[in-house]
Every structure is written in C-alpha cells, then in structure tokens.
C-alpha cells in the first residue's frame, strides 16, 4: 500500500466505516455482486508493516453490512468524484442511503489553490459558500477505497461462486429474446444507478444522463456496448466509468442496455446477447 492508502485506512477506521461496511465475500450466489470470487485469508493482510510498535494491522472484515460490501469497490468505482460526492453527502448519489455525511472532510474556499481537488454538488446539498474542497484526509480515504480490488486467484479454473445464467423463458415462448434475458431493471439498479441515478438523469458535473442520450438512442449499439465493456474516461468533466467486461455476462449487458433504451423517454431498438458477444470478441481481439 502507498503512504496515502495506509493513511486512508486509518481514516476508514477512525471514522467508523468498519461498523457498517464489510470487506468479505461469502461463497453464496447473493454475494457475487460484490466480488468476482469469495474472500480468502490473504485478502485481509492490507499492509506489510504494523500500524505502530504496539498495534498490528486492524481487522476490517466488518460484520454488519448495513452498507454495500467494499471488497471490490475500487473496481466498481475507480473514479475520485463518485467517492468524494458520496462522502460529502451520500444522498447525492444514492437517494435512499442511510449513511451519514462527512462534511468535516471538506472545506469551503473562495479561492482554492490550483492543485486543490474540488467537487460540484447540487445546490440543495450545498451548505456554505465558495468552492467545496476535499481535505487531505478525504483524498487519503478515497485512495484507500480505490485500492480495494480483488487480486486474481493463482489457481487456474477455480470457481467457487456458481456462474450466473439467464433464467429460462416460458416453455415454447420464442416470440421475444427479452423473455430469456435477466431482469435488466434490477441489474441497472445494482450496477449503474449509483452514478446514472434511478431516473437516468445522472448527476450534473459528475455523471452524464442516460435519458435522451444520443449514445443510448443510437440505432447502432456498438459504442454503447463498448463503453459498458471497456469503461469510459474520455472527457474530464465527467467521472470515470469502469469497464464491466469481467463483471457482467453478455446476457446481463444486453438486459441492462434494453432497459436503458426503453426507459426515461428513450426509444431505441433492443439488442441481443449475440450482438454483445460479437462486440466483446472484437474488443478482445484489438
């Protein structure tokens, strides 16, 4: 771990984050949304040095899971802006969140330094005047959270969590491939809504809207599929989007896309898992 990540671990402990967030994935189907595999003992040794002469690395397994598991949060949310908005006030990105806000990790400054990290928040969440500047403690905590990524297993072919397969449609029903796909609305809620929001409107200054999006409504789905597979970091005014090639199946991606193409006023042709598979093969071959 870097010095910033170790400092962030100390902030994580001191702010009580461990009371609500676990860092452990169990070997059951309901946990596969949090990581690519169940946790193992080596996952929990976060630094090679003791915290000080008296204390060993703290236990951060957690036990409550009031909030989402953080085992793989660095993979799910690799950008600073989402984490900073979430720390300033969780309701900005997750409307129903019960997590407390941490405004003391930020300050209001009329003329921040050039290298200061600032965030843009909706007016109704702003509690002071001037630019909102993230403190060193906030940036260290974000560095620690971004470092939480599951390392791949050394053993080849190990599979502890059952592979996700789309549910079978009604017997004899071949009228629509959508009947064979997973629940796109539920997948969107669990995978995309934290940034793009449940109403598809995104967050101004942080995450682009999907409602009335030219990318979503394009009749050619290649760009949209590529963005989901590879991620997106082309424009500095938007937060970084991770790629989901290793986290979502072709069927799940098709289900999410079809949900987005038919929601919030969007009206575009649906895509099939086969189309996603073709684009995935093309991307992997580049």
Image (cartoon, helix red, strand yellow):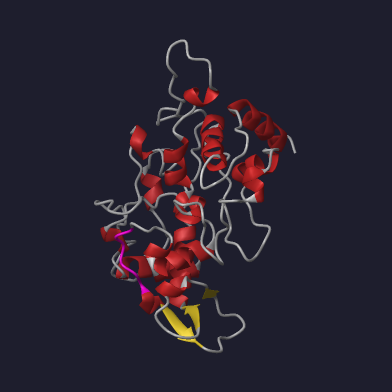
Q: Is residue 70 among the parts visible in the rendering?
A: yes
Near-viewer residue (227 or 198): 198
Near-viewer residue (90 or 7): 90
> Image point 46% across, 78% down: which residue?
135
**Residue range corresponding to the magenta coloring:** 97-102
Tell me: 270 left or right of 222: left
Question: Where does residue 200 sit, x and y in percent of width and height?
Answer: 50, 52
Most distant residue in the top direction:
172
What is the quadrant of the C terminus in the image? top right
Most distant residue in the bottom direction:
111
Count of numbered badges drawn on the protein: 0
Tell me: 156 left or right of 280: left
Instruction: Name the main secondary structure of what is drawn in magenta.
Output: loop
Most distant residue in the right direction:
286
Near-viewer residue (75 or 235): 235
Compared with 46, 142 (above or below) is: below
Compared with 272, 234 (above or below) is: below
> Residue 163: which quarter of the image?
top left
Q: Is residue 246 among the parts visible in the rendering?
A: no
Question: Where does residue 257 sit, x and y in percent of width and height?
Answer: 56, 39
Question: Where does residue 274 sit, x and y in percent of width and height?
Answer: 62, 26
Compared with 91, 106 (above or below) is: below
> Image point 54% across, 23% down: which residue?
177
Question: Where does residue 15 sit, x and y in percent of width and height?
Answer: 31, 69
Tell me: 234 left or right of 102: right
Q: Does the magenta stretch include residue 99?
A: yes
């Amino acid at each position: 771990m870097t010095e910033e990540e170790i400092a962030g671990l100390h902030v994580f402990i001191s702010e009580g984050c461990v009371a609500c967030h676990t860092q452990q994935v169990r070997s059951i189907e309901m946990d596969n949304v949090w990581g690519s595999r169940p946790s193992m003992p080596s996952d929990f040794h976060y630094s090679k040095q003791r915290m000080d002469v008296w204390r060993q690395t703290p236990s951060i397994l957690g036990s409550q899971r009031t909030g989402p598991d953080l085992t793989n949060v660095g993979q799910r949310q690799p950008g600073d802006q989402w984490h900073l908005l979430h720390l300033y006030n969780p309701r900005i990105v997750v409307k129903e969140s019960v997590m407390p806000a941490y405004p003391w990790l930020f300050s209001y400054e009329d003329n921040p330094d050039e290298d200061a990290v600032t965030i843009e928040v909706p007016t109704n969440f702003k509690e002071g005047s001037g630019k909102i500047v993230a403190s060193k403690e906030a940036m260290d905590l974000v560095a620690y959270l971004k470092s939480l990524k599951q390392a791949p297993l050394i053993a080849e072919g190990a599979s502890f969590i059952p592979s996700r397969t789309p549910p079978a449609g009604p017997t004899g029903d071949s009228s629509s491939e959508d009947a064979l796909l997973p629940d796109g609305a539920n997948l969107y809620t669990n995978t995309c809504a934290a940034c793009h929001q449940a109403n598809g409107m995104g967050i101004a200054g942080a995450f682009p809207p999907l409602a009335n999006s030219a990318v979503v409504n394009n009749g050619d789905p290649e760009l949209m599929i590529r963005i989901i597979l590879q991620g997106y970091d082309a424009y500095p005014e938007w937060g970084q989007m991770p790629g989901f090639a290793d986290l979502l199946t072709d069927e799940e991606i098709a289900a999410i896309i079809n949900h987005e193409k038919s929601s919030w006023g969007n009206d575009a042709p649906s895509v099939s898992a086969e189309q996603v598979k073709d684009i995935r093969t093309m991307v992997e071959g580049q």
